[in-house]
Amino acid sequence: VESYLGRFYCQKKEYKKALKIYQKGLTINPQSFVLLYEIGFTHLKLKDYNSVCKYWREVLKIAPYSILATEVRWNIERNDRVFDSTKK
């Protein structure tokens, strides 16, 4: 439920509201790689690249063979210059 409501707020560009909803979902299921992905994606919209990396690393750790992990890898490769700056 939280992922759908969070996406609704993201589509309306209400990213802070979306993050609150996603975080609430994580308190219920901290291993939800879907919520972790969505939180990372929302932080990407906010240009908070350190947080993107934090949450997307969790996706790769929890569900390395999922379609969302593939999406994470693709996004990181596509934006490698942005994400390289978070390693410093």
Image: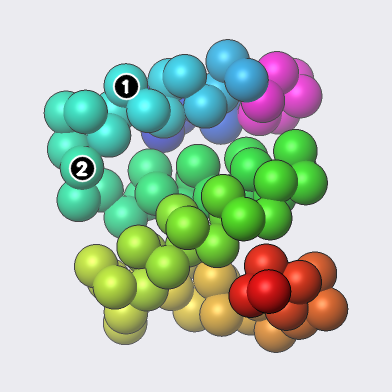
Q: Residue at x 70, y 84 (%)?
A: 77
- Furthest toward the front, the residue is 88
Q: Residues within 10 Å of mark 2 (few under 14, many from 20)?
A: few
Q: Between residues 60 and 48, which one lies in front from this camera angle?
A: 48
Could one spot residue 5 in this view of the protein? no
Q: Residues within 10 Å of mark 1 (few under 14, many from 20)?
A: some
From which residue to which does the magenta span run? 10-15
Could you tell me which secondary element the residue under label 1 belongs to? helix
Decide which of tag 2 and tag 1 comes sooner along the chain.
1
Could one spot residue 53 in this view of the protein? yes
Specify the label residue 24 is tagged with: 1
Left or right of residue 11, residue 59 in this image:
left
Q: Residue at x 67, y 25 (%)?
A: 15
Q: Residue at x 50, y 42 (%)?
A: 39
Q: Position of residue 47 (x, y in %)?
A: 77, 46
Q: How many marks?
A: 2
Q: Amino acid at mark 2?
A: Pro
Q: Quadrant of the C terminus?
A: bottom right
Q: Residue at x 35, y 62 (%)?
A: 58
Q: Quadrant of residue 49?
A: bottom right
Tag 2 residue: 30
Q: Between residues 17 and 10, which one lies in front from this camera angle?
A: 17
Q: Position of residue 32 (x, y in %)?
A: 25, 48
Left or right of residue 67, residue 49 in this image:
right
Query: Does residue 27 belong to the magenta stretch?
Result: no
Q: Amino acid at mark 1?
A: Lys
Q: Quadrant of the N terminus?
A: top left
For the residues labelled 2 and 1, the Cα–Cα distance comes to: 10 Å
Q: Position of residue 5 (x, y in %)?
A: 47, 21
Could you tell me which secondary element the residue under label 2 belongs to? loop
- Furthest toward the right, the residue is 81
